[in-house]
Image (tube, rainbow, N blue to C red):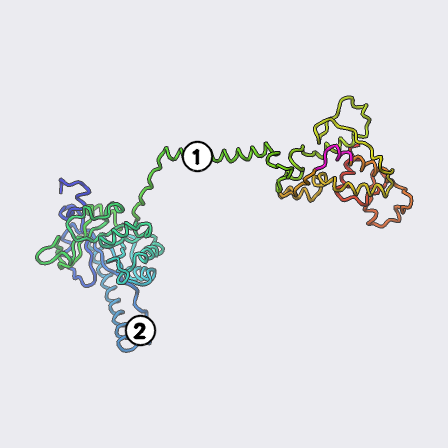
Amino acid sequence: MAGLSPAKAEFDRPWRDDTRALVIDAYEFNPINWKQMTGDKRIAAFINKASDGLAPAWSCRGMSGDDEKLCKNRWWKYSVTQELYMTRREMAKTLGLKWGAYHLGRPGNPREQADHFIDFAKPEADELIALDIEDNDPTQWMSLAEAEEFARQIKIRLDRYPVLYTNGSTAAYIAQNKETYPLLSRLQLWYARYRDDLTGVFPEGHWDKYALWQFSSMHNCNKRACPYRVAGAKDDIDVNVAAMNVEDLKKAWPFDGLVAPEPEPLPNAGALIAKVGEEARGAVAAIAEDVAALAKPGEAQAGGETVPGTLAAAYGPSTHAPIDPLKLLTETALEEKKAAEHPSPILSAVTQGAKTEPAPPADRPVAGPTQAIGTIGQLREEMQAVREILSDEKVEGDAAMTTPAASATPVKGAELKSRILELMKAAETAVEGVPGDKPVEEKKPEERAELSAPRGGWTILSSFAAPERRVASAFRATR
């Protein structure tokens, strides 16, 4: 054995190495002579069968005949088997052996079987626990999917995992389908294979090594030949070898951790950089398109139509400069002064060009109160842009980032100022003392509410909408 590599030594008859630890496993019908068996100092641990499938019915009440006899026989066997199990556990621990228990998995509820196993074995923290899946045949044994549930229930109850006992073909199947059995494929492996050499047959692509290898049993041990004969037991006893000495095995016991998952392959550095670079270029290109659209609003809104749902829609087509309400009010108030007072042309905040004095509305009669009100009413549609800017509804709409689409034919800046100036002149002629109007004292509260009284005078603005009244007040404040 000294000339073999470590991997080869683990797979080629390792029991022939006197330094390798051995573990015995038995069930209730294997007689044991404890004094003789513990004379072999290579034997470091003993694993005994605990439970088998589902627990028997808790009561035989209501049964009769053979059913009643069978029920009572199961309870008798359960009681005797558990008593023998507890006795062997005390004996093994007293003699310095590590202890373990296994559950023979059968078809049926895996969680109930896990609970049955725990209730039967009452395992302590330093004791190995194992699930025995004899073969991948769900008609006779617990299925692999059920074994996953069994292991999860053990983890829930005991906060640790069982060891998986199974044969070579089932272990290979689990390793090949580890995505389907993510937990089962990571349990420590108790490998049952009765041959001298595991080289080329052990599922090394998944499990790096076995926790225990059951190499001798009734299948390959008889009076003529046996891989390893155990003193104090018959030839049908199961014998296992560990890939370590006795001292190390006792440190590794009870093998309740999970096999480390296979590391994910490292990405190719060049491919990763290329991928990141491509993503960055895509992000920059997307931003560039948005910026280009903002920089060329005329192209983005061909045909003079506005883009709904944007703040720009409130100001009309983006080919015109946005309207500044404060500048608009100030310029309109200044229109009342003579052009001689301004030797240099005044630039319009709306058109960004030289302002022109609007022609007076000569085709209209001098406005009295009624005519002034009518004129003001005609300006409502033309003042849509200003109302949208100053109205509460527009402010609330902007806050929610939802704006109505502006008219396709917006009011020019000079024309809008002219109309506002006309509105102010008409409003100033509607003063207190208009013939036919009732005295203020005789007006109803709702009529008085429709009047504004700047500097002690009542001005009739009854047909003004709330935004229009704010415009009028703003003009007076700037004069």
The residue positioned 37% from the left and 35% from the top of the image is: 271
The residue positioned farthest toward the top in the image shown: 343
Residue bearing mark 1:
278
Which is more toward the observer, 139 or 410?
A: 410
* Segment tinted magenta in the rendering: 410-418
Tell me if residue 416 is in the magenta stretch.
Answer: yes
Label annotation for residue 60: 2
Q: Quadrant of the C terminus?
A: top right
| Residue 477 located left or right of residue 223 | right
Badge 1 amino acid? Glu
The residue positioned farthest toward the front in the image shown: 303
Upstream in sequence: badge 2 or badge 1:
2
Query: Does residue 160 show up?
Result: no
Q: Would you place residue 200 above or below residue 353 in this image?
A: below
Mark 2: secondary structure: loop
Expressed as whole percent of the image width and height from the top left, the position of residue 59 reads 32, 71
The residue positioned 86% from the left and 43% from the top of the image is: 370
Expressed as whole percent of the image width and height from the top left, the position of residue 356 reads 77, 28
Q: Would you place residue 390 above or below residue 42 in this image?
A: above
Which is more toward the observer, 425 or 6?
A: 425
Badge 2 amino acid? Cys
Displayed quadrant of residue 297: top right
| Residue 176 located left or right of residue 288 | left
